[in-house]
């Protein structure tokens, strides 16, 4: 196997491993907010590693460019989706997303 092939395999192992670890973290955590933290590596590190593996294997062909575009879309949309999910969980729990009376830290102004 060539050095490039070994690097491609290593990047794919990293991408799949990070995704599996994120899935296990989501399954193990009890709180929705903790679960949201475990989704981040699966939508940042894993797509970048897999896209890099595709680009190394296919060069900047149609497949390589599409892999890079998918990774960029995931990087851009993940923070928005995570914020919307956290806000929806808060609204479901408290009925509104604003800070509640008992949550304010002493001496802090809103």
Image (cartoon, rainbow, N blue to C red):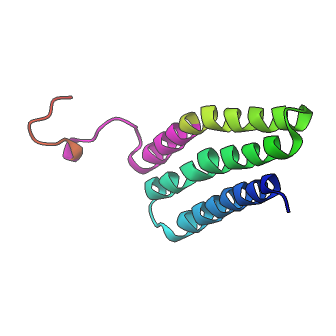
- In this view of the protein, which residue sits in the foreground, 37 or 44? 44
Residue at figure coordinates x 68%, y 48% from the top left = 49
Residue at figure coordinates x 48%, y 48% from the top left = 89
Q: In this view, does 58 lie to the left or right of 40?
A: right
Residue at figure coordinates x 85%, y 46% from the top left = 57
Q: Where is residue 51 in the image (x, y as percent from the top left)?
A: 75, 43
Residue at figure coordinates x 70%, y 38% from the top left = 71
Task: Provide the major secondary structure of the magenta segment.
Answer: helix
Question: Which residues lie in the magenta part?
Answer: 81-102
Q: Is residue 64 left or right of residue 85?
A: right
- In this view of the protein, which residue sits in the foreground, 88 or 49? 49
Picture quarter with the C terminus? top left
Q: Which residue lies furthest to the right in this view?
A: 62
Q: Position of residue 42 (x, y in %)?
A: 62, 52
* Residue 78, above or below 41: above
Q: Which residue lies furthest to the top in this view?
A: 110
Residue 80 on the magenta span: no
Residue 87 on the magenta span: yes
Q: Residue furthest left?
A: 107
Q: Position of residue 34 (x, y in %)?
A: 44, 57
The number of numbered badges drawn on the structure is: 0
* Residue 78, above or below 11: above
Q: In this view, does 10 lie to the left or right of 94?
A: right
Picture quarter with the N terminus? bottom right
- In this view of the protein, which residue sits in the foreground, 103 or 68? 68
Q: Where is residue 77 in the image (x, y as percent from the top left)?
A: 62, 34
């Amino acid at each position: 196997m060539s050095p490039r092939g070994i690097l491609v395999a290593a990047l794919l192992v990293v991408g799949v491993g990070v995704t599996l670890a994120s899935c296990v973290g989501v399954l193990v955590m009890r709180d929705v907010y903790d679960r949201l933290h475990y989704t981040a590596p699966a939508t940042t590190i894993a797509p970048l590693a897999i896209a890099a593996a595709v680009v190394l294997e296919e060069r900047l062909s149609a497949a390589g460019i599409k892999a890079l575009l998918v990774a960029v879309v995931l990087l851009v949309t993940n923070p928005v989706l995570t914020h919307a999910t956290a806000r929806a969980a808060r609204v479901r729990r408290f009925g509104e997303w604003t800070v509640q009376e008992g949550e304010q830290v002493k001496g802090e102004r809103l």
